[in-house]
Image (cartoon, rainbow, N blue to C red):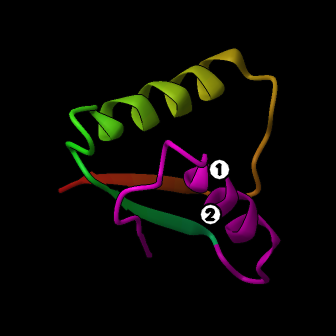
Amino acid sequence: MEVEAGRAVVNYQFLKDIFQACMMYGVEYLIIAVRNDYQKKDDFQKVCVFLETLYISNRLSLPLKGILIIGY
């Protein structure tokens, strides 16, 4: 589980978290907690839309069984 305190979207930290989880041995699931509101922007929604688009496009296959995004 990774908790992002604000820079999840600004620096694309959530993508780094996904990449790191993919590289770790034995990791099957990833949980990322993203702030709902950061500097008057909806980071949670942006991360969800990005990952949904990535999944629907089927252009990238990840070795994870699932990714859970939690908004806080």
Name the quadrant of the N terminus. Answer: bottom left
Which numbered tag is attached to residue 28? Answer: none
Q: Quadrant of residue 40?
A: top left
In the rendered image of this protein, does residue 24 appear above or below residue 4? below
- Give the structural element (helix, strand or loop) at label 2: helix
In the rendered image of this protein, does residue 60 appear above or below residue 4? above
Q: Nearer the viewer, residue 60 or 11?
A: 11
Q: Is residue 29 magenta?
A: no
Q: Which residues are magenta?
A: 1-27
Q: Position of residue 25 (x, y in %)?
A: 79, 83
Pointer 1 local density, CA inside 10 Å: few below 14, some 14–19, many at least 20: some
Residue topped by disc 1: 15
Viewed as shown, does residue 45 lie left or right of 4? left
Label 1 is placed on what type of residue? Leu
Q: Is residue 47 visible?
A: yes
Viewed as shown, does residue 48 lie left or right of 70? right
In the rendered image of this protein, does residue 57 appear above or below residue 30? above
Q: Are marks 1 and 2 in contact (CB under 8 Å)?
A: yes
Label 2 is placed on what type of residue? Asp
Viewed as shown, does residue 56 lie left or right of 9? right
For this orientation, the residue located farthest to the bottom is 25
Which residue is located at x 53 percent, y 28 percent?
A: 50
Q: Is residue 24 magenta?
A: yes
Residue topped by disc 2: 17
Q: Position of residue 27 (x, y in %)?
A: 66, 77
Label 1 and label 2: CA atoms lie apart by 5 Å
Pointer 2 local density, CA inside 10 Å: few below 14, some 14–19, many at least 20: some
